[in-house]
Amino acid sequence: MAEVSLKNVEKVYPNTEKKKHGSKSNLKVTEEGVLAVQDFNLDIKDREFIVLVGPSGCGKSTTLRMVAGLEEISRGEIYIGDKLVNDIPPKDRDIAMVFQSYALYPHMTVRGNMEFPLKLHKVPKEEIKKRVEQAAEILGITEYLDRKPKALSGGQRQRVAIGRAIVREPKVLLMDEPLSNLDAKLRNQMRAEIIKLRQRINTTFIYVTHDQTEAMTLGDRIVVMKDGVIQQVGTPQEVFDHPRNQFVAGFIGVPQMNFYDAELIRRPDGVYIVDVNGFRVELSEEKQKNLREQGVEPQQVTLGIRPEHVELAPKQSAGLKGRIEVAEMMGSAVHLHVNACGKEGIIIVQTVDLPGIELSELSIGNEISFIFSGKLVHLFGKDGHNLEF
């Protein structure tokens, strides 16, 4: 239906609103004001599902609201299709938006809520009836059409809010943290519903969330933001496997990546190895190649390793030593919070595949040894960037 393009988009708030963004924020402040979104460039393909993800205050909702026309753009250009929409009011942008709070009219029935935007646009009655019933069928809310919102659960209300948006058959569907008010089980169900929905309607999706699980499961591509700046754009797998910097590495993945101080060493034969508190690992050939191409010199680094990529080892092995501080039994796995090298990290151990270790040994206070492969580590410079890029 429509491509969306944001070119050098910025949003500046007056300095008087600095406190609104929180004292912990690292948003850039200029003489003009607080830069909530900086130099944002993104081309979204027709029917693509893009997810903007990041911590609270990173600028993702502000960006979405600029696309919607609910926030003025301080600088830059936004195109929907081939039309520049900077000065076009929201009602004329051919977009629809689903909010976190549902924003349903309590005095109207579900049918009335879904019909309302079509009546505003003076769509013929028969067409309204057809669109509402089609949307209700897609979302599984046909039986609730004559009820009022107060008689619905949170998940049902969110379905109605989505239905009200899709009956307009917008070029672009904007969703601002639509699942954050739901409990964990409902969130899982609604994620699945949204995945099904995007297969059935010809619309470009822009979805905002702080929940990286939603981002990973929903997006064709995800845009990771921090302090108003894009940190990385890529498919969920690209961002997970090849984080561009330490922030992205720590933000994407549950539980988050473990980080240890380390030293990158280059042997006389040119082979890179990494030393973590005396435990040395030779990097994989792919990582050797990437580091050589970037001309990386030996240096102090931060090594990142995901909890699921750490392996337990016999105590007498040459691995890293750590003490278990918390052991969380998750059924098929144990999540061990381990203090090693002066830092707390997490190791995920599958209970069905313990390497010669008794489950009883994985209790609080016990010392363990662990190792990891040079193929699965990530190396970050002191400025936080991934040394492979």
Image (cartoon, rainbow, N blue to C red):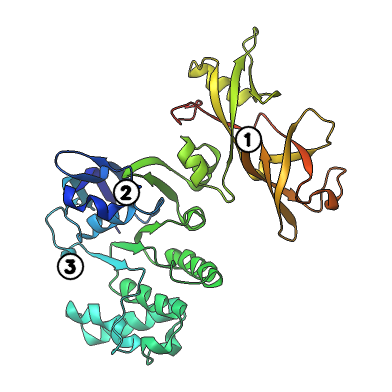
- Asked whether residue 277 is in view, the answer is yes
Q: Which residue is mark 1?
A: 342
Front: mark 1 or 3: 1
In the drawing, what numbered circle is on residue 91?
3
State which quarter of the image contains the N terminus: bottom left
Q: Is 212 on the left or on the right of 68, as rendered? A: right
Q: Three-letter amino acid code at disc 1?
A: Gly
- Residue 212 image offset from top left, x and y in percent: 49, 53
Instruction: Give the vertical position of 122 relative to 267 (above or below).
Output: below
Amino acid type shown at disc 2: Ser
Secondary element at image label 3: helix
Residue that badge 2 annotates: 23
Instruction: Name which of mark 1 and mark 3 comes first in the sequence.
Output: 3
Question: Tag count in the figure?
Answer: 3
Residue 379 location in percent, x, y?
A: 55, 29
Residue 268: image location, x then y, percent: 64, 7
Q: Nearer the viewer, residue 160 or 331?
A: 331
Q: Locate residue 283: give its quadrant.
A: top right
In the displayed structure image, the side of residue 210 where residue 46 appears, left or right: left
Distance between the Cα atoms at labels 1 and 3?
56 Å
Q: CA distance from mark 1 to mark 2?
A: 29 Å
Q: Earlier in the sequence, mark 2 or mark 3?
A: 2
The structure residue drawn at horizontal position 37% and vertical position 83%, both measured from the top left corner, is 133
Q: Is there a contact, CB below 8 Å, between mark 1 and mark 3?
A: no
Instruction: Work out whether 199 lies above or below 148.
Output: above
Residue type, numbered disc 3? Lys
Packing grade of label 3 (10 A; few <14, some 14-19, many >=20) is few
